[in-house]
Amino acid sequence: MAFVDTASIQVKAGDGGKGCESHYRDLWMRYPRADGGDGGPGGDVIFVADPHIQTLLDFRFKKHYQGERGGHGSSKGSTGYSGKDVLLRVPVGTVLWDEGTGLLIRDLSTAGDQVVVAKAGRGGVGNIRRRTPVPPTQGEAKMIRLELKLIADVGLIGFPNAGKSTLICAISKVRSKIANYPFTTKQPVLGIVEADMRSFIMADLPGLIEGAHLGKGLGIQFLKHAERTKILVHIVDMGGSEDRDPVDDYEKITHELEEYSDLLAHKHKLIVANKMDLPDSKKNLKRFKKKFGSDIIAISAQERDGLEELVARIIELLKTTTPTSI
Ligand SMILES: Nc1nc2c(ncn2[C@@H]2O[C@H](COP(=O)(O)OP(=O)(O)OP(=O)(O)O)[C@@H](O)[C@H]2O)c(=O)[nH]1
Ligand SMILES: [Mg+2]
């Protein structure tokens, strides 16, 4: 998907400083005394998940990161200084991979999560502690791949052909395939909707059908995706195209969400009545409102009617919604 942000970088932790080999002697001493101090440890390379960072853009420009080398030991038993760590701040949700081994290092899924990806070298031991100084070790070097899956703020759900793709195409720059047959959309498509100096990410999800929670249609995989969004926008074909009954459609999808998980059942939702340009839509909407209340936004995605109000309502709802799951 186009919205996976990635970057590859090279990291190298700081080497340890050398242990010192030195001897002290003065006029009154018969034998010199060993007084070489230890080298200091190098600096680690550490990743931390920071909620104030949104993208991996910085890592596209700067590709090498190096922890500081530890200071060398010196005479009079002085230990070298510790090299400074490199702290790399990444967005929450960044997944780190070791490119050399192909193994997962860590999924930094919670703000404040930290992981040392390259361990610093130890300082060498000076001759004050050992007859022959022990050499320092080197800091680890690795190629790290960073991956960030952008999570949509809003998920579009509804029966196939309800007009989800038509809507996302009308309010964002994304092009999602529109056609008058079920399951036109087979993969989630993410688009950025901008209005009022604000923006949010909307996901056009494949249509749901009865039994989706059991894996029917393209169901389960995308219900999982819907779980990660902040709010859901439920699109109902109010025109009742192809002899569908909007009330029945709405109840079926709601049932699927409830069966799938509590999280989906209780997620904030906006109900959108689409295809209000079709002849039966007004009559259907009246019946629909009697059953499910009047807080329903009526639009025609095709005629681009009512879209401003819908976007404004989404923005307003996003302001007051804290994510239930990330
Ligand atoms: N009359 C009318 N037709 C619409 C409207 N919105 C969408 N359609 C038509 O409904 C059909 C299905 O639209 P899509 O946007 O592909 O529907 P979808 O919900 O994305 O369908 P899937 O991807 O299969 O789940 C297309 O022929 C659209 O032109 C509308 O507001 N009015
Ligand atoms: Mg579609």
Image: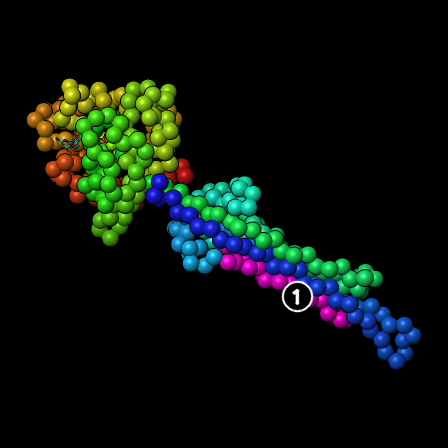
Q: Quadrant of ligand 2?
A: top left
- The percent position of residue 192, horizontal first and vertical second, equals 28, 45
- Tell me if mark 1 has few (under 14), some (14-19) or many (20+) residues whose alpha carbon lies within 10 angstroms of its own: many
Q: Nearer the viewer, residue 234 or 106?
A: 106
> Relative to 109, does residue 179 appear above or below in the rendering?
above
Q: Residue at x 30, y 31 (%)?
A: 186
Q: Residue at x 61, y 53 (%)?
A: 140
Which residue type carries mark 1? Gly
- Horizontal side, residue 255 vs residue 32: left or right: left
On the image, numbered disc 1 is attached to which residue?
71
Most common SS among magenta residues: loop
Which quadrant is the N terminus positioned in? top left
Kindly state the secondary structure of the residue where label 1 is placed.
Answer: loop
- Horizontal side, residue 320 vs residue 73: left or right: left
Q: Residue at x 15, y 24 (%)?
A: 241
- The percent position of residue 217, horizontal first and vertical second, equals 32, 23
* Residue that protrudes farthest toward the left in the picture: 279
- Segment colored magenta: 64-88
